[in-house]
């Protein structure tokens, strides 16, 4: 697996350890950067094949664990083993997967589409219990309209249905 930033290296360690050895490592403050234990945030872990093809992506838009280290570990395992769109990652695939980690800001309500920019902001659309999220700066998503269309589709919300919209930024690590 490929990645340079400490957040990404941690996600890789968790995935590889689980797949190769059946063990989930515990976050160690002696080995990981202190900020991983000082901050709580939603986190997405994305896996791509070397050719750029998506291989898994799971995350949380609000924190569900005690810190970023635990959030990354949880979502790395989910992306590798339980993304419903894909079969679980196998050991023989590990060397051909590129990992990225996105740490999300808190979502804020949007009052006008003019407040959106698909390169800068991710979005969450919500209608009742249905919710769809799309990360920012995705290849092929260049307009607000396209970003909204995809997020609604992910949530099972019809094109013309009224939605609440939230935006967030990410710190993306490779």
Image (cartoon, rainbow, N blue to C red):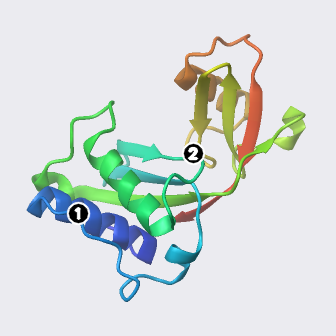
Please report the residue visible at 53 percent of the width from the left and 58 percent of the height from the top. 102
User: What is the quadrant of the C terminus in the image?
Assistant: bottom left
In the image, residue 109 above or below residue 174 = above
2 or 1: tag closer to the N-terminus = 1
Question: Residue 153, percent across and down?
Answer: 57, 20
The front one of 111 and 149 is 111
Question: Residue pushed farthest front?
Answer: 66
User: What is the quadrant of the N terminus in the image?
Assistant: bottom left
Question: Residue 137, percent across and down?
Answer: 62, 49
Please report the residue visible at 33 percent of the width from the left and 37 percent of the height from the top. 83
Q: How many marks?
A: 2
Question: Residue 89, percent across and down?
Answer: 20, 47
The front one of 52 and 62 is 62
Q: Are marks 2 and 1 in contact (CB under 8 Å)?
A: no
Relative to residue 159, is residue 37 drawn left or right? left
Please report the residue visible at 68 percent of the width from the left and 26 percent of the height from the top. 126
In the image, residue 130 above or below residue 62 = above
Report which residue position mark 1 lands on.
Answer: 24
> Badge 1 local density, few (<14 within 10 Å), some, or many (20+)?
some
Question: Residue 163, percent across and down?
Answer: 75, 22
Relative to residue 39, is residue 28 drawn left or right? left
Image quadrant where residue 26 sits: bottom left
How many angstroms separate mark 2 from mark 1 (CA)?
30 Å
Report which residue position mark 2 lands on.
Answer: 138
Image quadrant where residue 129 sits: top right
Q: Secondary structure at mark 1?
A: loop
Q: Say which of marks 2 and 1 sits in front.
A: 1
In the image, residue 126 above or below residue 11 = above
Relative to residue 62, is residue 95 drawn left or right? left
Please report the residue visible at 23 percent of the width from the left and 57 percent of the height from the top. 96
Q: Would you say residue 174 is visible in this rendering?
A: no
């Amino acid at each position: 697996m490929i990645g340079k930033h400490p957040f990404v290296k941690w996600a890789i360690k968790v995935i590889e350890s689980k797949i190769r050895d059946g063990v989930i490592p515990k976050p160690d403050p002696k080995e990981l950067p202190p900020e991983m234990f000082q901050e709580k945030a939603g986190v997405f872990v994305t896996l791509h094949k070397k050719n750029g093809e998506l291989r898994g992506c799971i995350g949380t838009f609000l924190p569900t664990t005690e810190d970023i280290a635990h959030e990354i570990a949880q979502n790395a395992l989910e992306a590798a083993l339980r993304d419903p769109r894909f079969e679980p990652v196998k050991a023989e695939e590990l060397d051909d997967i590129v990992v990225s980690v996105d740490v999300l800001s808190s979502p804020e309500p949007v009052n006008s589409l003019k407040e959106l920019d698909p390169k800068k902001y991710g979005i969450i659309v919500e209608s009742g219990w249905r919710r769809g999220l799309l990360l920012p700066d995705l290849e092929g998503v260049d307009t607000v309209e396209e970003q909204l269309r995809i997020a609604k589709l992910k949530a099972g919300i019809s094109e013309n249905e009224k939605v609440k919209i939230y935006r967030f930024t990410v710190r993306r690590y490779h």
